């Protein structure tokens, strides 16, 4: 009798163990099936091959020309490398995110003036969330999300007007015709209090508002979104969907492209800390996108390793760009002027990309024999680069490397 009970007990354990294995196998297959991304039906750019296709690329393949602007300013102004640059006909608008200050420089890099100042008084900002200039009207705009206001400054008379806003956007863009886009991408459906896209005129009148499409419920501060100028329109990219949207003439969002990879991180992990920790070891996650007429230049992470993807819109080919380990991980070989390899940190338009270069790093990379071994095409630009190199000092302000894209 006891032997019979023991036999039945062991049999049940064996059946239960087999049952668990079967359930695990079924769940694993289901997970693999659900995690495998199907190709989109509409327009998309397939960047799948890029993450494992590591190679060197020459700058002349993607760009027509390049130049350097060394920023010079009074001793009281020390700039960090965390700069955002806007390009205008006669000047550069430089926003130092780290020091919370904004300046105007001429196109040669000479300091012109400081725009507003930090403080709690009239015309001052507590937190510099964004800054833009209307060149035609000679007006500057400072976004202070902390105090929920936009400061409009006449650059000639220094007079100002404070425009109160009801939201706390993370950035600001001028749309032309006296319109301002206030951008707040970091709220999911459960958290959102105000619209992601919020448009006002120069006096604060609300002209329109809407939300980004396909916003996940839990989208929060770890989400990423990006706005950049493309043929005088604003293109918007966000991590929650991998879509690139365009704000059209009627200030409505439409999808113009989708960046697709068969190993893209599942959407439920984009804005969930715990899932992201797990998924980041297995999948690709895009971090920022720069777009020209012919190329996407994408910063990404694949299996916890950095990827710098160059996608050719015409040939549909994608590759992971590298330069040289321990000298400079990423950069297009500068065969135009023989100087600093290039990878963008920002873009002024579809034709103007830029990178902020520390002068010490510039000297280290450009003076290295590995860099100097590459031939260059433009002798005049090379001569200018050499003069810049010889005149650099360790305590100099950063250099703006500007590349004019094909």
Image (cartoon, helix red, strand yellow):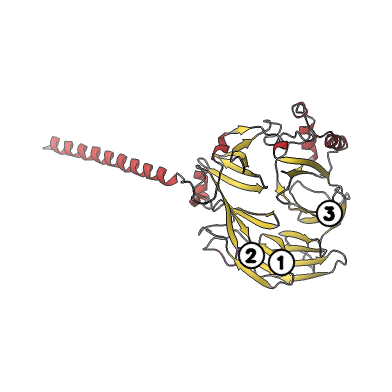
Q: Is residue 57 above or below residue 405?
A: above
* SS assignment at label 3: strand
**Of pointers 2 and 3, the one earlier in the residue sequence:** 3
Out of 186 and 250, give the one closest to the viewer: 250
Dot 1 alpha-carbon crowd within 10 angstroms: few under 14, some 14 to 19, many 20 or more = some
**Of pointers 3 and 1, the one earlier in the residue sequence:** 3
Q: Is residue 154 left or right of residue 227?
A: right
* SS assignment at label 2: loop
Query: Who's the residue at 78% across and 37% down the image?
Result: 362
Mark 2 → mark 1, Cα distance in angstroms: 10 Å
Query: Who's the residue at 40% across and 44% down the image?
Result: 33
- Residue at image mark 2: 251
- Residue at image mark 3: 91
Quarter residue 58 falls in: top right
Quarter residue 373 falls in: top right
User: Residue 372 placed where, x, y %?
Assistant: 78, 28
Quarter of the figure with the N terminus: top left
- Residue at image mark 1: 179
Q: Is residue 68 above or below residue 370?
A: below
Out of 208 and 265, give the one closest to the viewer: 208
Residue farthest to the front, as pictured: 314
- Verify whether residue 114 appears in magenta: no
Query: Who's the residue at 34% across and 40% down the image?
Result: 25
Q: Write the start and end of the magenta stretch as one range.
A: 190-197
Q: Are marks 2 and 1 in contact (CB under 8 Å)?
A: yes
């Amino acid at each position: 009798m006891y032997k019979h009970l023991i036999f039945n007990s062991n049999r049940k354990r064996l059946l239960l163990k087999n049952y668990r294995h079967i359930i695990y196998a079924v769940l694993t297959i289901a997970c693999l099936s659900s995690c495998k991304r199907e190709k989109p039906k509409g327009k998309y750019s397939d960047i799948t091959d890029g993450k494992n296709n590591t190679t060197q690329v020459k700058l002349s393949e993607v760009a027509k020309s390049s130049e350097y602007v060394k920023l010079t300013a009074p001793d009281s102004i020390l700039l960090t490398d965390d700069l955002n640059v806007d390009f205008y006909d006669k000047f550069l608008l430089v926003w130092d995110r780290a020091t919370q200050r904004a300046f105007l420089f001429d196109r040669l890099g000479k300091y012109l003036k400081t725009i507003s100042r930090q403080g709690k008084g009239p015309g001052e900002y507590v937190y510099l969330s964004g800054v833009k200039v209307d060149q035609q009207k000679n007006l500057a705009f400072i976004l202070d999300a902390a105090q929920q206001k936009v400061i409009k400054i006449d650059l000639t008379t220094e007079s100002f007007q404070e425009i109160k806003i009801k939201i706390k956007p993370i950035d600001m863009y001028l749309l032309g015709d006296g319109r301002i886009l206030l951008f707040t991408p970091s709220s999911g459906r459960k958290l959102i209090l105000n619209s992601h896209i919020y448009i006002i005129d120069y006096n604060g009148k609300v002209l329109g508002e809407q939300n980004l499409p396909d916003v996940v419920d839990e989208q929060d501060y770890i989400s990423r979104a990006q706005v950049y100028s493309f043929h005088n329109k604003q293109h918007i990219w966000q991590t929650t969907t991998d879509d690139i949207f365009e704000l059209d003439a009627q200030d409505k969002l439409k999808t113009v492209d989708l960046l697709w990879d068969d190993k893209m991180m599942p959407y439920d992990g984009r804005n969930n800390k715990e899932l992201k920790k797990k998924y980041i070891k297995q999948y690709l996650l895009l971090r920022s996108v720069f777009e020209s007429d012919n190329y996407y230049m994408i910063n990404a992470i694949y299996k916890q390793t950095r990827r710098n993807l160059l996608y050719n819109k015409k040939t549909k080919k994608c590759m992971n760009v590298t330069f040289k380990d321990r000298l400079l991980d990423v950069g297009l070989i500068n065969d135009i002027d023989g100087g600093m390899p290039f990878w963008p940190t920002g873009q002024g338009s579809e034709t103007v990309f830029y990178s902020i270069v520390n002068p010490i790093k510039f000297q280290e990379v450009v003076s290295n024999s590995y860099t100097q071994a590459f031939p260059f095409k433009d002798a005049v630009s090379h001569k200018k680069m050499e003069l810049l190199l010889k005149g650099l000092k360790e305590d100099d302000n950063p250099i703006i490397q500007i590349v004019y894209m094909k």
